[in-house]
């Protein structure tokens, strides 16, 4: 097999990086010159969403092409829950490997069950949500492995390869992982075979202050304007827990968040320069994305897990060698990425995949502006899960479900508590991008729209055998 008979794939994704926090969007004062330049010769998807704006559910969907709840991912892989990407699931790594690709995974995985669920003192040293994923089926087709489960020590990360002995590093995680990616491409891989590399950066995920000073110095003495929908009073998480930030704290956290994104831009630039120098750039599909966004005070919220654009909309920038289309407007979400990449690589899409191949919208002068993305979230905090379980209830059946269309966001909410409180929300997101005010969906102008979207969501839940529907219709 010749070196250039198949395209290579590099998929880079950050954790908690929202779509608006990049220079070319001109929404936020973020310095990202390398990404901006890349975007000029790539395809930018402006309607890309996280189906379930939380780490593990998105990642499971990203790799398998299935909806998170079909995979039993109703929250993150965490202590006390028997939740992981099951062995029988076929992910993109398995497909790539079966068709002759060298496969590599570097960075955060967070799709394996925490080892503390089974051992008080795991041999690997994994603590809390973290886990060493041993070689074999749990790596889902990825051969080269330099990874960890879940740990937010950005300045002193650790990694496992093929033994339970971890490697402790004293370097910013995104920089170190990019070093390892370049090392893999230059030294570790076989040059005569195509490769597929997934690189999962943890920043700009909190804690925000764990970012190198050289990136924070870009913003430290600048006056930055926060998003119009930021509220400084009573900052809280989606489940109501308060966040003890004052205005100055939130401004600093936002600067630190921007600094991390600028740091990722620097690492991305390094990787692109390497690919060009090695003659790999023009034979490699490169994707730059994230698993979900971050509210950072918008609507008075911190974190993710909600249906607002700051949490829901993700960057998705893809360079397909020879492709001239610069922007894609068609809605696509987590489960659509795997089948789309396989189609672009001219590889078969496994049976059971629930996402849709979007490759035609990336490469041809066509769009499907009627296509929608279904979205959802469930109660996930340990104390809430225990409360549901103590009541004999399934937390996966609660939370909210909805749909994001070209112009609207429609949500049906039951809530995060055992007491059902049904609510509906409709936002004309195209006219009100900051979602400052839900529209009056009982008005003549919107009632038909609501009926249409609710029917769509109900049908989707029915196909998913989602227990939310029974509670909603009760």
Image (spheres, rainbow, N blue to C red):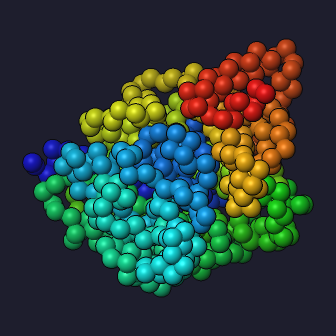
Looking at the image, which is closer to me, 285 or 173? 173
Looking at the image, which is closer to me, 69 or 253? 69
Looking at the image, which is closer to me, 296 or 106? 106
For the C terminus, the image quarter is: top right
In this rendering, does residue 319 appear at all? Answer: no
Indicate the position of residue 249 as horizontal and vertical percent values: 79, 72
In this rendering, is residue 94 above or below 266? above
In this rendering, is residue 302 above or below 336? below
The structure residue drawn at horizontal position 26% and vertical position 37%, both measured from the top left corner, is 347
Indicate the position of residue 291 as horizontal and vertical percent values: 54, 52
In this rendering, does residue 442 appear at all? Answer: yes
In this picture, residue 437 sits left or right of residue 356 = right
The structure residue drawn at horizontal position 41% and vertical position 61%, both measured from the top left corner, is 199
Outermost residue, left side: 1
Indicate the position of residue 342 as horizontal and vertical percent values: 33, 39
How many numbered circles does the render carry?
0
Looking at the image, which is closer to me, 106 or 314? 106
Q: Quadrant of residue 79?
A: bottom right
Indicate the position of residue 466 as horizontal and vertical percent values: 62, 34
In this rendering, is residue 20 above or below 147? above
In this picture, residue 210 sits left or right of residue 285 = right
In this picture, residue 175 sits left or right of residue 443 = left
In this picture, residue 357 sits left or right of residue 242 = left
The structure residue drawn at horizontal position 76% and vertical position 15%, both measured from the top left corner, is 448
The structure residue drawn at horizontal position 72% and vertical position 69%, both measured from the top left corner, is 253
């Amino acid at each position: 097999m010749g070196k250039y008979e198949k395209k290579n794939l590099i998929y880079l994704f950050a954790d908690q990086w929202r779509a608006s926090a990049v220079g070319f969007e001109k929404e936020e004062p973020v310095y990202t010159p390398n990404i901006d330049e890349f975007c000029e010769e790539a395809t930018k998807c402006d309607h890309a969403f996280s189906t379930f704006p939380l780490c593990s559910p998105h990642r499971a969907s990203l790799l398998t092409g299935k909806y998170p709840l079909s995979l039993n991912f109703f929250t993150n892989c965490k202590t006390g829950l028997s939740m992981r990407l099951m062995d029988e699931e076929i992910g993109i790594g398995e497909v790539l490997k079966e068709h002759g690709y060298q496969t590599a995974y570097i960075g955060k995985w967070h799709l394996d069950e925490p080892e503390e669920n089974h051992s008080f003192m795991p041999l690997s040293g994994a603590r809390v949500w973290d886990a060493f994923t041993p070689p074999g089926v749990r790596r889902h087709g990825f051969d080269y492995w330099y990874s960890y489960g879940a740990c937010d020590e950005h300045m002193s990360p650790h990694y496992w390869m093929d033994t339970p002995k971890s490697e402790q590093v004293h370097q910013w995680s995104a920089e170190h992982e990019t070093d390892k990616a370049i090392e893999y491409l230059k030294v570790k891989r076989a040059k005569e075979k195509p490769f597929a590399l997934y690189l999962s950066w943890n920043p700009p995920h909190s804690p925000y202050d764990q970012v190198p000073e050289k990136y924070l110095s870009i913003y430290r003495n600048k006056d930055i304007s926060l998003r119009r929908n930021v509220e400084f009073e009573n900052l809280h998480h989606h489940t109501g827990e308060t966040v003890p930030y004052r205005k100055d704290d939130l401004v600093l956290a936002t600067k630190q968040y921007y600094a991390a994104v600028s740091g990722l831009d620097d690492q991305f630039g390094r990787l692109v320069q390497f690919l060009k120098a090695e003659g790999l750039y023009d034979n490699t599909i490169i994707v730059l994305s994230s698993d979900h966004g971050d509210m950072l005070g918008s609507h008075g919220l911190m974190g993710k897990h909600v249906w607002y654009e700051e949490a829901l909309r993700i960057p998705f920038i893809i360079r397909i060698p020879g492709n001239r289309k610069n922007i894609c407007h068609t809605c696509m979400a987590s489960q659509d990425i795997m089948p789309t990449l396989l189609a672009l690589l001219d590889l078969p899409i496994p049976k059971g995949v629930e996402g849709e191949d979007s490759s035609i919208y990336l490469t041809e002068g066509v769009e499907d502006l009627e296509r929608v993305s279904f979205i959802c979230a469930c109660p996930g905090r340990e104390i809430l899960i225990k409360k549901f379980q103590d009541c004999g209830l399934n937390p996966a059946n609660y939370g909210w479900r909805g749909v994001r269309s070209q112009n609207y966001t429609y949500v049906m909410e039951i809530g995060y508590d055992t007491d059902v409180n049904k609510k509906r929300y409709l936002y004309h997101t195209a006219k009100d991008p900051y979602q400052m005010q839900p529209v009056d969906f009982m008005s003549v102008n919107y009632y038909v729209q609501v009926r249409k979207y609710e029917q769509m969501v109900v049908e989707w839940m029915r196909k998913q055998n989602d227990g939310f529907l029974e509670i909603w219709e009760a």
